[in-house]
Image (cartoon, grey):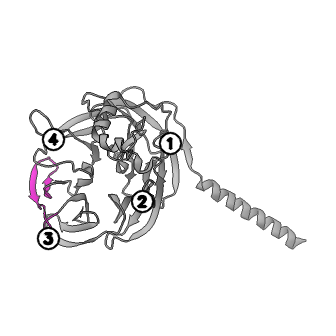
């Protein structure tokens, strides 16, 4: 009898442990009805401008941000996607050196697609599956091949890389995004962290829907990705092991693309649309771009932006969430857009080419919190 009681008690304890473990694995959701602060919460102060007229900031297939990174001294490295040259600007935004050129030699880069700085080394990914490593002055160290299908974005995380890549099915109609941790020395996959099936597949637009902008990877290995970006405003925060730990967002009314955005899209993809290769969606993605500042607040740019409609006076929608997923503030701004990025307390905004003067610049803004958090 005593043994039976002991067995029953043991089973109850095991069940309680399993239930508690299961509850710990559930995603905690934060429901936000309205922002915490309704008055002015932040200010953006312009602190400088970088002349990049002589640098090709955009390539045909890759966004500019993949070609920009910073070293430990705060110097900014910008890869010219066409010329294969790297320009280095100091923390005062002065050009201090340039190295590299197009080609296949030790100090040359051909069709560069991404630049990442780690351990005082510059990793340049070029071609389809090649990489080259140079020091901070452009001196050759080594090179090799990356054996991954359709690499989209390399992110520096701790001492390794996160790689976002695309995988198609046998019919070449489906598209799945895969995030993996990759060893920075051997470029071998350490483990797969995340998979996302893109509902429209390859028929959906990829030029304007920058999947690498949907992903935000932190230095500590955590990352953020939208839950269902084509239908609702919900962001999932994942642990460094790829486990979802927090879901948050806000009420979101989907609005169709403006006529200007539709006209611009059709002008760009007219042939592909007529051949039935690309379909234009009615609605923009809810989450267009994310970055996290030094206060651990997440900035989210949402919906249609002026990169979609070509109107430089268009004010984009921005939300700020704290580390707990609580909605702090919402505002409109021409400063923040899809073509911006964050580093060390500053927001860098890449301006379009001035069609009158034919010059181009990166504006730099400092973040100032007006209200206490």
How many angstroms separate mark 1 from mark 4 (CA)?
35 Å
Q: Quadrant of residue 274?
A: top left
- Kindly check if marks 1 and 2 are in contact, taking CB atoms under 8 A apart as contact: no
Q: Secondary structure at mark 3?
A: loop
Around disc 4, counting alpha carbons within 10 Å, would you say few (fewer than 14), some (14 to 19), or many (20 or more)? Answer: some
Q: Secondary structure at mark 2?
A: strand
Q: Position of residue 231 (x, y in %)?
A: 49, 39
Q: Secondary structure at mark 1?
A: strand
- Left or right: residue 80 versus residue 164 is left
Around disc 1, counting alpha carbons within 10 Å, would you say few (fewer than 14), some (14 to 19), or many (20 or more)? Answer: many
* Count of numbered circles in the view: 4
- Left or right: residue 329 versus residue 361 is right
Say the numbered circle drawn on residue 248: 1
Of tags 3 and 4, which is closer to the observer?
A: 3
The verdict on residue 105 being magenta is yes
How many angstroms separate mark 1 from mark 3 (CA)?
47 Å
> Which of the marked residues, 1 or 4, is nearer the chain's N terminus?
1
Where does label 4 land, which residue? 361
Q: Which residues are magenta?
A: 83-109
How many angstroms separate mark 4 from mark 2 (CA)?
35 Å
Q: Position of residue 45 (x, y in %)?
A: 23, 34
Where does label 3 land, which residue? 106
Where does label 2 land, which residue? 167
- Kindly check if marks 3 and 4 are in contact, taking CB atoms under 8 A apart as contact: no
Of tags 1 and 4, which is closer to the observer?
A: 4
Of tags 1 and 3, which is closer to the observer?
A: 3
Of residue 114 and residue 271, the one placed in the foreground of this image is: 271
Q: Position of residue 279 (x, y in %)?
A: 40, 42
> Which of the marked residues, 2 or 3, is nearer the chain's N terminus?
3
């Amino acid at each position: 009898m005593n043994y039976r009681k002991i067995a029953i008690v043991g089973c109850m304890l095991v069940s309680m442990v399993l239930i508690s473990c299961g509850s710990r694995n559930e995603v905690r959701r934060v429901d936000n009805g309205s922002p915490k602060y309704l008055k002015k919460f932040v200010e953006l102060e312009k602190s400088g401008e970088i002349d990049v007229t002589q640098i090709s900031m955009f390539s045909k297939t890759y966004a500019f941000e993949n070609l920009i990174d910073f070293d430990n001294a705060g110097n900014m490295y910008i890869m010219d996607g066409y010329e294969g040259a790297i320009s280095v600007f100091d923390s005062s935004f002065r050009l201090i050196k340039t190295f590299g050129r197009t080609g296949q030699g030790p100090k040359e880069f051909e069709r560069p697609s991404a630049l990442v700085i780690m351990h005082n080394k510059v990793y340049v990914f070029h071609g389809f599956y090649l990489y080259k490593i140079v020091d901070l002055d452009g001196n050759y160290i080594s090179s090799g091949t990356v054996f991954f299908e359709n690499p989209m974005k390399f992110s520096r995380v701790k001492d390794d890389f996160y790689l976002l890549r695309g995988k198609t099915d046998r019919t070449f109609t489906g598209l799945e995004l895969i995030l993996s941790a990759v060893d920075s020395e051997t470029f071998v996959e350490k483990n797969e962290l995340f998979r996302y099936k893109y509902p429209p597949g390859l028929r959906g637009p990829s030029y304007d829907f920058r999947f690498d902008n949907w992903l935000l990877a932190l230095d500590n290995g955590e990352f953020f990705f939208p839950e269902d970006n084509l239908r609702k405003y919900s962001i999932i925060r994942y642990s460094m092991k790829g486990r979802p730990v927090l879901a948050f967002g806000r009420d979101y009314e989907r609005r169709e693309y403006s006529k200007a955005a539709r006209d611009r899209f059709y002008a760009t993809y007219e042939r592909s649309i007529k051949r039935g290769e690309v379909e234009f969606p009615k609605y923009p993605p809810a989450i267009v771009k994310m970055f996290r500042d030094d206060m651990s607040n997440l900035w989210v740019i949402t919906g249609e932006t002026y990169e979609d409609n070509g109107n430089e006076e268009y004010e984009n929608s921005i939300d700020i969430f704290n580390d707990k997923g609580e909605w702090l503030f919402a505002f409109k701004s021409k400063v923040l857009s899809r073509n911006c990025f964050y580093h060390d307390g500053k927001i860098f905004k890449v301006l379009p080419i001035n069609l009158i003067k034919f010059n181009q610049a990166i504006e730099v803004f400092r973040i100032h919190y007006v209200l206490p958090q």
